[in-house]
Amino acid sequence: MLPRRIPGLAELAGRGTQRLAAMCDQHGLLPWGAPPPGDAARLRPELPAPTLTPSAAAALDTEAVRARADLVLAGRYPLLGHAHGHAEPLHWGAVPDWHRDMLSGRVAPRLHWSQVPYLDVNAVGDHKITWELNRHQWMLWLAQAAALTGEARYSDALWQRLAHWLEHNPRGQGINWASSLEVAFRAIAWTYTLHIAPSPPPAALATSLASALHAHGRHVERWLSHWFSPNTHLTGEALGLLTLGVAFPWLPRAATWRALAWRILCTEATVQIRPDGTYFEQTGWYQAYTVDFYLEALALAEQARLEVPEVVRGRTHAAARALAAMTHANGTVVRFGDDDGGRLLPLATGSYGDVRDTLAWAAVTFADASLLRGLGDCSSGPAAQGVAWRRGDAGLRALHALAAGLSENSSDRNVSAWLPDGGWVALRGAQIAVYMDAGPHSALSGAHAHADALAIEVSVHGRTVLADPGTFQYMGDGRDRLRATMAHNALTVGDASSATPGGPFRWTRVPTTCVTGTRLHGSEQVAQAWHDGFGTLVRTGTGRSWRELRLLHDQALLVFDWFDGEPIEPLRLHWRPPVGVRAVVEQHRILLLDDTVSSDRAHVLATIVIPPEWHADITMQGYSPGYAVCANVTGVTCTPVQAEVRACCALVVPGLASSDVSVRSVEPLSPDHAARGWPSWRVVLYQRDDIVTPTSFS
C-alpha cells in the first residue's frame, strides 16, 4: 500500500485560498480589473518566431496544410486519435457546440467552472475530447493555410469561429474554464494564430479578444496547479502566462505574469526533469510535452531578456537527448505510460506521435546534431516544417548544417542508451531496435503511469512490430484494461499486474524496479533488470521477475525472462503488436505479419522463436493507436507446458517466413549457471549454434 501523503500548512492554505477565490467568483465577488483596450495593431504578438518568408515556406507541405484546414472548414476536426487514418475526424460542424463530447453525445452543464463535474463521464462524457476542440489548435491550421495560400476563406472562418466561441463561453462559465491548463493551451494557440494569420481580426473581434486574453491570464494566475496536478499542468500553465506576458507586454499584468511564470518554470525544471533528462512521470508522450514546453520557454525568455539559469538550459537539453533516445526510427516516441494525444503547437503535418519537429527544434536550439540521429532527410518533412515555422530561414540553415555534419559521421547513428534515473533502455542496431521501461513506476500519484515494468517496444527496419497498447481514454472501463501488465509485452503471474490501480489517476501498490547492468557497445548489446511487482504471488522465492535483452550482431534480439520463486498461478508471457501487424502461431514460431498488405501471404515483418516448453495461443487484445480510438489486435500469450517451467528465451529476428526459420531454434538446457541458478538455452541462429545464459553483471 502506498503511504498517504499528508498536505502541509502551505498546501492547505493555498488550496483554501484558491477555493475561496472560486466561491467568490461564482457569486460575482472577485475583482478582475478593467479589460484592456483592444485594437488589431496591438494584437500582433511579440514572439521569437519570425514572419514566414517565401524561402522558409518552400520547406512546408502546402497541400498537406491545405487538406488539414479544409477538413476544419467542413466541420471535421482531425484531433487526438481521430486523425492520420486511425479514425474519421470528429464532426462538430462548422459552428460547434463547444460543450459537447462528440463521441458520447453528452453536453456539459453551463455552470460556473468550479461546479462542472468534468470527471463524471455520465454528466459530461470524456472531458478530454471536449477540451481538445477547445484548445483551438486547429485555428493554427486555418492561419497556416491562409498564410501559405493567400485565400481569405481560411481567415474568415478562423475569425468567425473565434467570435462564436467568445460569445458562447463567457469568462468562468462552463467546462472550458474548468482546467487552468486548458485555458493556458488556448491562450498559447490564440497567440500563435495571431502571429501566423496574414490578416488581423476584425475591429469588433479585436476588442473582445483583448479582453479574453486578459481574462485567460488572470484565470491561470489565480488557479495555478501548485497542488492539484503539479506536473505538466503546472509547467503548461506557467508557459501560458509567460507567452501572454512576453507576446502582449501591454496587458495590465504582463510583467507580473512573466516573473511568476519564469520562477515556476525554473523551479520545476529540476523537479520534473531528472538529471538524465527523463520526465518524472515516466511517460514517453509527456516527455515530448516537457521538451516542447521548455524549448518554448527558453525562446520566450531570450526574447524577454530573462536570466536563464544554466541548470534550466542543461535540464532542457538533457530532456531532448532523452526524448531522442526513446524515439523510433520513424520519428514516433515510445508510448510507455499515458498518451493523451496532445501537443503544444501542432505546426508540422507529421503522423500521430511524430516528434521529429521537436527534436529538430532542440537540435537548432542547442546546436546538437546528435538529436537528429536516425531522423532521415531533414530538408523536408516534420523536422524542417517545425523549424520553418519557429525559426524561419536562419533556423533552416542551422538545421541543414547540423544534418550535413551528422551524415558525414556514421558513428552518430544507431547509438544505444541507458537513462539511469528514468530506467529507460534503448538497444539499437541497423535492423532492430528495442526499448524497455525499467525505471521507477512514476512520481506523485502515478497519474500517467502504466503497470508496464520491464515492458518493451520493438521495431524492425523502422517499423514497430511489438508495441505499448496506448491509452484510449482517461475515464471508463478501458482505462485499466490498457494500463494492465497483460496488455504490454511483458511477463505476468496469471492475469495479475505488476502494479494495482486505485482509481483512474492513482495506484495503491507499485513495484520496485532495478537495472542490474547494461552493455551498450560491441557486437552483443545487453540490458538486464528485475522488478518485484509479483512478490506477494509466490509460495516460495522472492517473486522477482527478471528480463534481459541481448541484441546479437544486429541480426537478432534475445529476450530472456525468468521468475524467481514458485508462483501461485501459471506464468504468462505476452506479445502485443500494434494495429497493422497481425500475429500468427506456427508451432514454436510467432510470425508478425504486415496486415496492411493485400496478398495471399502477407509480408512477414519479424519472427519470434520460443522454446518447446512454452505453448503459444492467439489472444485478442485492445490497442489504441491514438487517444479516443481503440481496436482489437491479434497478439499471442505464451504459457509454460509444465508448472515448474519458470524461464523463457525468445528469439526475435527480422522478416523471414516459416519456410526459412528451420535453421533457428531455442531449446532449453539444464541450468548450468550454478552460482545463481539461472537457466540456459541452445540458440541456433543462421549458422551459429550457441549456448546462452543470462549475463552475470558484477
Image (cartoon, grey):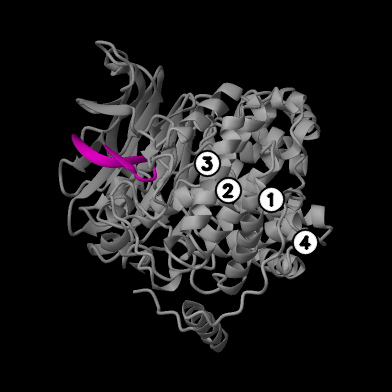
- Which span of residues is magenta-colored? 615-631
Amino acid at the residue labelled 3: Trp
Q: Residue at x 25, y 41 (%)?
A: 621
Q: Which residue is mark 1?
A: 296
The span from disc 3 to disc 2 (Cα, nearest Å) is 12 Å
Badge 1 vs badge 3, beta-carbon distance below 8 Å: no
Badge 1 vs badge 4, beta-carbon distance below 8 Å: no
Q: Earlier in the sequence, mark 2 or mark 1?
A: 1
Q: Which residue is mark 4?
A: 250
Q: Residue at x 54, y 29 (%)?
A: 429
Amino acid at the residue labelled 2: Leu
Badge 2 vs badge 1, beta-carbon distance below 8 Å: yes
The span from disc 4 to disc 2 (Cα, nearest Å) is 24 Å
SS label for mark 2? loop
Q: Which residue is mark 3?
A: 138
Amino acid at the residue labelled 4: Trp
Badge 4 vs badge 3, beta-carbon distance below 8 Å: no
Query: Which numbered disc, 1 or 3, marks the residue closer to the eye?
Result: 3
The span from disc 1 to disc 3 (Cα, nearest Å) is 19 Å
Query: Which numbered disc, 4 or 2, marks the residue closer to the eye?
Result: 4
Quadrant of the rendered image containing residue 11 = bottom right
Q: Earlier in the sequence, mark 1 or mark 3?
A: 3
